[in-house]
Amino acid sequence: MPTDTTGETDPTVAARDRDRAVLAAVVFVVLFAQVTLYPGVDTLVTALGATGVVGASTWFLAVEFVAFVVFAGVWGLASDATGRRVALVRLGALGAGLGYVTLAVAPQVAPTSFGTVLAVRTFQGAATVGAFSLAITMLMDLSGGHGRNMGAAGIAIGLGTALGAPVGGLLYGFGPFVPLAVAGALMFAVALAVGVLDDRTGGPSRRGGFADVRSRLRSTPALLVPYTFGFVDRLSAGVFALAGTLYFRTVLGLSPAETGAMLLAFFGPFALLQYPFGVLSDRLGRAVPIVVGSAGYGVAVIAVGLAPTVALVAAAMVLVGVVGAFMAPATMALVTDLAGADDRGVAMAGFNAAGSLGFLGGVVLGGTVAEATGFTAVFLVTGAIEIAVALVAVPALLWATPAGRQLLER
């Protein structure tokens, strides 16, 4: 029977390619559903009964990512311990869909406090991270090249956020609860779609507790390198989700639809370049894309804050997308390079938890600095942090990669 270059037979290759496409679609939908809420988040929290737009928007975004941080490891441990990821992705998607729909319907049926809204939002986030993190973990389980598989995840993340922003802006034109209803319906669709997937874990792992997460980090401390970059990169995403959106809305005077289009200027190139840059990282190694991409990303974020016109802001957003696409799949692929086959769920959960902490930090940083000193300072501080981490982490990043270690040993 014919084989591909990895030695796999045609039916195996076809099943792998099918699973890669379906899993990328799952990641796409999860991010699309999530980001549809961002362009008009100020409108949404007001409709949900909040007072104080900046503070309420901060809490609404932040509690979801608190849930991401707390529950990413739980989902990863459960999938490694049981050897089952498909059923858990389905469960997470169903829970997320229920959370979104509840947020859309409950305030229209009966008076609902904003505290209750935040509790439901937390539940929705806890479920969402299960579908998201385990879908990426299942891409890690596939053969065919870690850069290629993480490039598929990256392009799905990029496309989901790229299209979710402008579509969300348009959906807000039909009412503040419409994006929530659409997000819920999409997550229910994910729960149905994952039925075609195969589990490729090789069975249950003996690992089963949070002590194993610490053990994994002790045995492979190099994982802290991609975790650190994941944290900082998602910090900037959190800044854009809140402070960036409010900057576009209040300072530049853009509508929700125009704000979505501005976010598309970033997420478009970020999505389209993920896969080719992921494949390129298989050839170049991980160090160059991560370091050069992160430093360039910081410069581009600063340029967004300093650009004097809407057109130049849009151009800077495109630059952010290009350099972000250069580093993102290499960072995720490095996690895959370092993780063992029996604890990929835990390894990717750690990466996603670090990223969620970063996003949460970005939301808090953006909201706090914007209220205290203005939006320009937000972009300056965020870009400076990205550049500083890229420069300081160079020795650790080289040590974390085989090619880098050979260079250091010379």
Image (cartoon, rainbow, N blue to C red):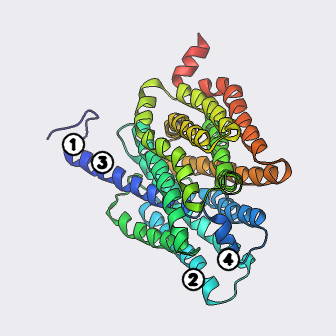
Q: Where is residue 103 in the image (x, y as percent from the top left)?
A: 60, 77
Q: Which secondary structure, mark 3?
A: helix
Name the image quarter holding the C terminus: top right
Tag 4: residue type? Leu
Left or right: 383 in relation to 16: right
Question: In the rendered image, is residue 201 in sight?
Answer: yes
Q: Which secondary structure, mark 1?
A: loop
Query: Mark number for residue 17?
Result: 3
Say if 372 sits above or below 92 in the image: above
* Mark whose residue sits in front, 1 or 2: 2
The residue that disc 2 covers is: 105
Mark found first going from the N terminus, 4 or 2:
4
Q: Which residue is drawn at 79% across and 68% down?
A: 52
Q: Which residue is drawn at 65% across and 69% down?
A: 43
Q: Where is residue 281 in the image (x, y as percent from the top left)?
A: 46, 30
The residue that disc 1 covers is: 9
Query: Mark number for residue 354?
Result: none
Left or right: 40 in relation to 388: left
The residue that disc 4 covers is: 48
Question: In the rendered image, is residue 129 in sight?
Answer: no
Q: Distance between the residues labelled 4 and 2?
A: 10 Å
* Mark whose residue sits in front, 3 or 2: 2
